[in-house]
Amino acid sequence: MTDILVITGLSGAGRSQAADDLEDLGWFVVDNLPVVLVDKVVELSGESGGAIDQLCLVVGNVRQQTSVLASLESLRKAGHRVRLMFLEASTRELVSRYEATRRKHPFVEEGLGLEALIERERTILEEVRAAADLVIDTTGLNVHQLKSKLVELFGPTSSQDVLQVTVTSFGFKYGLPLDVDMVLDVRFLPNPHWDERLRPMTGVDEPVREYVMSQPATTEFLQRTLSLLELVLPAYVQEGRSYFTLAIGCTGGRHRSVVLAESVAAGMRNLGYAPRVTHRDMATN
């Protein structure tokens, strides 16, 4: 059985944005799908070895939306869980969005202006709206608020699963990493590089780890960093962010930053996150 979500609604109400958000949540999304292909797409998803268990179908124009209801009924009879979501917004809000983007309304009826076209589309889609399991009015929602609502409705049971977290170590001498959200500098800690025994090793070796973790400032730094992350990560989720990357740097990226990246990642796991850990410069001579 496949969990199928069909997105319909007024043009400009946020169907494409909702599709992007659901894709971030792990749904397999097919956008602007002709109704005649609905059964075939569902059939193919069932033949993929069970890899596609959450399928989102975004139905486009008015004609396609008014034809989709019969297909949904046949899918339900076949044993699939099918939900129909309808997105709408006030006419004034939709007019404002079209004026801001300068895009043409996809529904065309000769002699009608933009506001009349929106009202005409609304009337034609009344049957689809009435059949919807869920109606979302996006009038007062920005993109982050819409995503937050979809996470609440269709996301994982734990909000932490929504945010993909990466912790990376690096060396300042090789430059700052690109596309990170937060950078922490641990060059204030004593450098194992000056210990000839530890110099050839890296932060994944136990002697280096013991050296770094034995420093008085390390424990407090780690505690305060985790307290900061405990505060900001839920806020990232609330703002609709899908990714967060924390970069921890020392001079060469081989010792202190590696130890702290691993330790911070372990602490984040205790907070319920599942961080990916990378060490950009650890293998650099």
Image: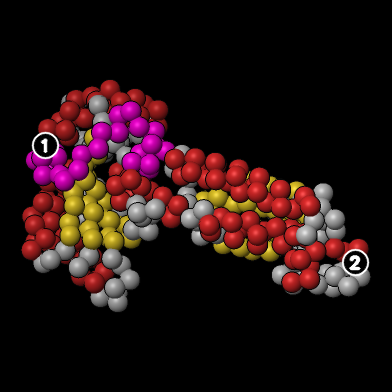
Q: Is residue 254 above or below residue 50?
A: above
Give the image location of residue 228, x and y in percent. 60, 43
Image-based side of 33 in relation to 162, left or right: left
> Does the stretch in magenta take in 131?
yes
> Does the stretch in magenta take in 5?
no
> How many numbered tags mark residues here?
2
| Structural distance between the alpha carbons of marks 2 and 1 | 75 Å
- Residues 277 and 91: in front is 277
Query: Where on the picture, by quarter, is residue 33?
Result: bottom left
Q: Which element carries disc 2, helix, strand or loop?
A: loop
Image-based side of 199 in relation to 266, left or right: right
Tag 1: amino acid: Glu
Tag 2: amino acid: Asp
The residue stretch that appears in magenta: 125-149
Q: Are marks 2 and 1 in contact (CB under 8 Å)?
A: no
Task: Residue at 28%, 22% (x, y): give it.
Answer: 92
- Residues 199 and 71: in front is 199
Task: Residue at 59%, 52% (x, y): give it.
Answer: 245
Give the image location of residue 93, x and y in percent. 30, 26
Q: Quadrant of the C terminus?
A: bottom right
Image-based side of 81 in relation to 193, left or right: left
Of pointers 2 and 1, the one earlier in the residue sequence: 1
Query: Where on the picture, by quarter, is residue 279?
Result: bottom right
Label 1 Cα neighbours within 10 Å, binned few <14 / some 14-19 / many ≥20 = few
Q: Which mark is residue 195?
A: 2
Q: Which mark is residue 126?
A: 1
